[in-house]
Structure formats: structure tokens, C-alpha cells
Image (spheres, rainbow, N blue to C red):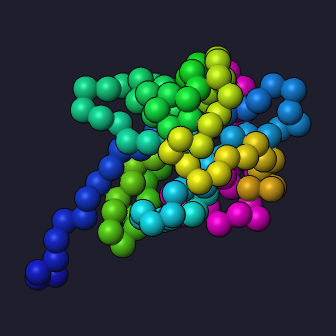
Amino acid sequence: MTGSTTKKRVHVVAALIFRPGDDARFLVQQRLPGGSRGLLWEFPGGKVESGESEPEALARECREELDIALHVGRRLWAGRHEYPDLTVDLVLYGARLESGEPKTLGAQALAFLTPEEMRALPFCEADLPPLEELVAGRLVPLL
């Protein structure tokens, strides 16, 4: 194909944060309006910067965007999604809150929801495969 440009590719880590005591509820966030995929829902996380490990990036992103400290557990899922403008390599980790109460510093809204409740929301396409794995009971979120 002539004249095509190479799509930007990003390496993204996300957290499946289970709150003990809740009945299988996990933290999800709504993206800020105005940006790419604005107001869609996703698992919290962000881009891995040069020189960072995936767990380091996840802990940093959640500290910056949610004002929480995380214990990052094991890798639960990995996949790639092709958006028209972007290729996302997404890795999902199990995680638990170590300190802090999530705040909407880098999100429009936050909610602790069951996988079935999440399905009713408009999610980013890259987050749909791990969400379906969670709904089907194939992801074991506990650390």
C-alpha cells in the first residue's frame, strides 16, 4: 500500500485491582473527555516508559493518576489491539491496594464493579478481551 504511514505503537500495562471484602468487584476508570477514546472505560494503568519494567510502570501510573500505592502481582493476560490510529500492546496484572483511596486525578470517573456490571459500559476495545476472560472466570485475580 503506497503512501501509508506506520501507526504509532504503545506498550501499556493495566491493573486488575480487587478490593478485599467486595464481592468480586474490580476498579475501572473512565477516560477523560477530549482525548483519544474519551469517556470510554478501561482498567487503570498507562504507558511503559523507556527503562521501566512493567510492574514499575504500573505502580507509577497508578500513583500519578489515582494517588494510590499498589502491590503489583503476577501477569494475568497479554494481547495486542489494532486501532485505526494506534497499535496497543496491553498487559494486565493482578494488583492490590497497599495505601490510599483511588482519586480521579487522571480519569473522569472511577468505580468498583463486577465483571457483569463492566460489560454494560462502553469499554476501550483493547480492554474487551481481558474483560471477557474475567467474565468467563478464566482470569484469577488474586495474588
Q: Nearer the viewer, residue 20 or 81?
A: 20
- Is residue 38 among what the camera can see? yes
Q: Is residue 21 left or right of residue 119?
A: right
Q: Quadrant of residue 26?
A: top right
- Is residue 137 among what the camera can see? no
* Residue at image location 57% in from the left, 21% down from the top: 69
Is the residue 99 above or below the residue 19 in the image?
above
User: What span is colored magenta in the figure?
Assistant: 119-143
Q: Quadrant of residue 117?
A: bottom right
Quadrant position of the C terminus in the picture: top right
Residue 59, image x, y percentages:
48, 26
Q: Is residue 127 magenta?
A: yes
Report the number of discs.
Answer: 0
Q: Nearer the viewer, residue 44 or 116?
A: 44
Residue most extreme to the bottom: 2
Q: Is residue 91 left or right of residue 118?
A: left
Quadrant position of the N terminus in the picture: bottom left
Is the residue 31 above or below the residue 38 in the image?
above
* Residue at image location 25% in from the left, 26% down from the top: 51
Residue 9, image x, y percentages:
29, 54
Residue most extreme to the left: 2
* Residue at image location 46% in from the left, 32% down from the top: 64
Q: Is residue 65 left or right of residue 47?
A: right
Q: Is residue 100 magenta?
A: no
Q: Nearer the viewer, residue 132 or 22?
A: 22
* Residue at image location 74% in from the left, 61% down from the top: 119
Residue 13, image x, y percentages:
46, 39
Is the residue 112 above or below the residue 55 in the image?
below
